[in-house]
């Protein structure tokens, strides 16, 4: 019984995360300002990392956890660089 409940919960989480990523993509494409697009990109990488963690839970493979760590690291650096670029117009001083 508990394995069935866990499988259903993981599937529901994957579906909800895919919908959330779709909403982020829509905001990236339709965002009226650059700040909205950067925020949507930030949301999308967080959703992608959590989706990778859910895949890792489903399959039991540690490779997905390493991929999620890499996604969050690169996503944080990208968000910080884009935010600095929007504030000052340059990334490297």
Image (tube, rainbow, N blue to C red):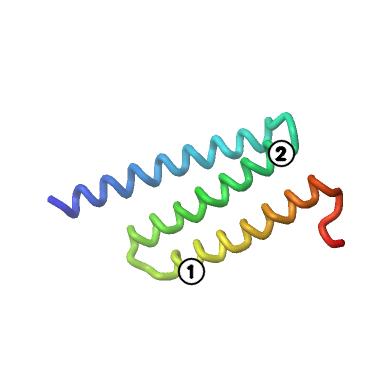
Tell which of 89 and 64 is nearer to you. Answer: 89
Report the residue at 56% width, 59% height from top.
Answer: 72
Tell which of 42 and 63 is nearer to you. Answer: 42
Residue 59 in the image, given as x and y percentages of width and height: 34, 62
SS at mark 2 in the image: helix
Q: Are marks 2 and 1 in contact (CB under 8 Å)?
A: no
Residue 61 in the image, given as x and y percentages of width and height: 37, 68
Which label sits in the foreground, 2 or 1? 2
Spatial CA distance of label 2 from label 1 is 29 Å
Residue 69 in the image, given as x and y percentages of width and height: 51, 65
Report the residue at 68% width, 39% height from top.
Answer: 37
> Left or right: 77 with respect to 6?
right
Q: Residue 85 carries which label?
A: none
> Left or right: 88 with respect to 74?
right
Residue 26 in the image, given as x and y percentages of width and height: 61, 34
Q: Mark 1 points at which residue?
A: 66
Report the residue at 82% width, 57% height from top.
Answer: 91
Mark 2 is surrounded, within 10 Å at the Cα level, by few (under 14), some (14 to 19) or many (20 or more) other residues, namely some
Upstream in the sequence, badge 2 or badge 1?
Answer: 2
| Residue 34 placement: quadrant | top right
Mark 1 is surrounded, within 10 Å at the Cα level, by few (under 14), some (14 to 19) or many (20 or more) other residues, namely some
Q: Which mark is residue 35?
A: 2
Q: Where's the C terminus, which quadrant? A: bottom right
SS at mark 1 in the image: helix
Tell which of 6 and 81 is nearer to you. Answer: 81
> Left or right: 66 with respect to 39?
left
Q: How many labels does the image show?
A: 2
Report the residue at 86% width, 54% height from top.
Answer: 90
Location of residue 29 with respect to 67 vertically, above or below: above
């Amino acid at each position: 019984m508990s394995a069935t409940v866990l499988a259903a919960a993981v599937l529901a989480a994957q579906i909800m995360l895919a919908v959330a990523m779709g909403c982020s993509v829509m905001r990236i494409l339709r965002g009226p300002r650059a700040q909205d697009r950067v925020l949507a990109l930030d949301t999308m990488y967080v959703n992608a990392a959590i989706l990778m963690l859910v895949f890792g839970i489903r399959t039991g493979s540690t490779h997905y956890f390493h991929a999620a760590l890499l996604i969050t690291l690169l996503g944080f650096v990208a968000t910080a660089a884009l935010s600095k670029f929007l504030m000052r117009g340059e990334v490297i001083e």
